[in-house]
Image (cartoon, grey):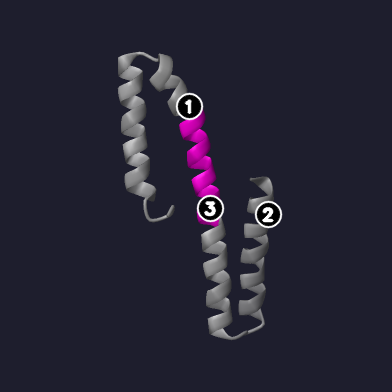
Amino acid sequence: MTNRLRRVVGQVDAVGRMIENDQYCVDIMMQLSAATGALGKVGEIVLENHLKTCVAEVLEGGESTDREKKLEELIGLFRKYASVID
């Protein structure tokens, strides 16, 4: 995941250079789209990891109130970030 984040940083830096160099707007938009997609993939990985670890642990052995809280947390995450992750 760290490598993915480094690529995103590189893509964002490239966008900055492209804007500074007054490059063609369509090319800038394509680079922005690539960075957005890559960042979305990082978000998917983080969410998957959260589901496989924190959520799974609470659902398997936690108290019912803890399970309910974790489910509410997940619902909130999906509502807030649904447009970020495909």
Q: In the rendered image of this protein, does residue 22 appear above or below residue 74?
A: below
- Residue placed at 33% from the left, 25% from the top? 69
Q: Are marks 1 and 2 in contact (CB under 8 Å)?
A: no
> Which secondary structure dominates the residues rendered in magenta?
helix
- Kindly identify which residue carries mark 1: 54
Q: Are marks 3 and 1 in contact (CB under 8 Å)?
A: no
Marks 3 and 1, how far apart at CA: 20 Å
* Residue 30: % across, % down: 55, 75
- Kindly identify which residue carries mark 3: 41
- Kindly identify which residue carries mark 2: 6
For mark 1, give the secondary structure: helix
- Residue placed at 38% from the left, 56% from the top? 83
Q: Is tag 3's residue or tag 1's residue first in the polypeptide sequence?
A: 3
Q: In the rendered image of this protein, does residue 25 appear above or below residue 66?
A: below
Image quarter (top left, top right, bottom left or bottom right) of the N terminus: top right
Image quarter (top left, top right, bottom left or bottom right) of the C terminus: bottom left
The residue lying toward the viewer, choosing from 69 and 22, is: 69
* Residue 19: % across, % down: 61, 78
* Residue 52: % across, % down: 50, 31
Judge the density around disc 3: few (<14), some (14-19), many (≥20) Cα neighbours within 10 Å: some
Judge the density around disc 2: few (<14), some (14-19), many (≥20) Cα neighbours within 10 Å: few
Residue 49 part of the magenta segment: yes
**Camera-nearest label, 1 or 2:** 1
Residue range (magenta): 39-53
Three-letter amino acid code at the position of disc 3: Lys
Q: Is residue 64 left or right of residue 12?
A: left
The quarter holding residue 8 reads: bottom right
- Residue placed at 53% from the left, 82% from the top? 26
The quarter holding residue 31 reads: bottom right
Q: Is tag 3's residue or tag 2's residue first in the polypeptide sequence?
A: 2
